[in-house]
Image (cartoon, grey):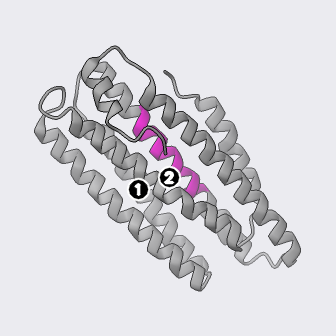
């Protein structure tokens, strides 16, 4: 199965267009917050997939290295959740900048998972790449949102316009999440013909 990256590119473009007029009120923030547990589940699924193959296709050393990266990402996601709470209490561009920086670090860490995965079996590599790429897409969507919201904080636009734009951005984020969920199901349920890989995939959550 190939991830439909054209579809994701289209949704990502919609996300960017909507967020050029995003407001700094509750709807977009609730949608963003709902993406963080999904991102965490994606990362956990990727790490669990590797762990399920440890000792056979994947060496224990590689498994340990990737688990360490996964633990670091989980801590970074928790940091973002804490920063979102700070922003909810007192919206500021400074807090948004901190969220953006942590999310960029998460994107880099997710890339490190693939760099550390020195495995030759193509089916195993393909499935892990799909899982990690989906997590990266989620993180990058959040990263793209932050500077646009920061610009709105100082825009001085009328409240009604901000509220309307807020709903538009939230709806676009929610559509993005729906696409992610659908793609995840395809990744974990598609049979590869590689028995260990299929067994590892079956051990993962079958939906987000």
- The vertical placement of 170 against 125, above or below, is below
Residue 180 visible to an observer of this rendering: yes
Residue toward you, 85 or 10: 85
Q: Quadrant of residue 6?
A: top right
Near mark 2 (Cα within 10 A), the count class, few <14, some 14-19 or many ≥20, is many
* Residue 205 percent coordinates (x, y): 40, 41
- The vertical placement of 137 against 189, above or below, is below
Q: Which residues are magenta?
A: 130-144
Q: State the residue at coordinates (70%, 73%).
A: 24
Residue 21 visible to an observer of this rendering: no
Location of mark 2 (residue): 139
Residue toward you, 193 or 70: 193
For the residues bearing labels 2 and 1, Cβ distance under 8 angstroms: yes
Q: State the residue at coordinates (71%, 74%).
A: 25
Q: State the residue at coordinates (29%, 31%).
A: 200
Q: Is residue 177 left or right of residue 154?
A: left
Residue toward you, 12 or 202: 202
Location of mark 1 (residue): 106
């Amino acid at each position: 199965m190939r991830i439909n990256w054209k579809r994701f590119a289209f949704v990502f473009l919609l996300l960017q267009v909507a967020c050029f007029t995003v407001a700094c009120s509750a709807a977009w923030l609730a949608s963003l917050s709902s993406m963080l547990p999904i991102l965490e589940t994606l990362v956990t699924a990727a790490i669990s997939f590797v762990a399920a193959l440890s000792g056979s296709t994947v060496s224990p050393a590689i498994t340990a290295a990737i688990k360490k990266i996964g633990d670091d990402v989980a801590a970074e996601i928790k940091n973002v959740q804490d920063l979102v709470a700070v922003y909810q209490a007192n919206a500021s561009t400074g807090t948004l900048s901190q969220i953006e920086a942590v999310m960029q670090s998460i994107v880099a860490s997710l890339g490190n998972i693939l760099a550390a995965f020195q495995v030759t079996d193509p089916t195993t590599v393909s499935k892990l790449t799909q899982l990690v790429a989906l997590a990266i897409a989620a993180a990058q969507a959040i990263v793209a949102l932050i500077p646009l919201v920061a610009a709105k904080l100082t825009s001085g636009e009328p409240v009604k316009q901000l509220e309307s734009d807020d709903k538009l951005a939230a709806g676009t984020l929610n559509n993005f999440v729906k696409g992610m969920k659908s793609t995840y199901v395809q990744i974990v349920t598609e049979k590869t013909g590689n028995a260990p890989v299929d067994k590892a995939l079956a051990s993962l959550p079958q939906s987000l």
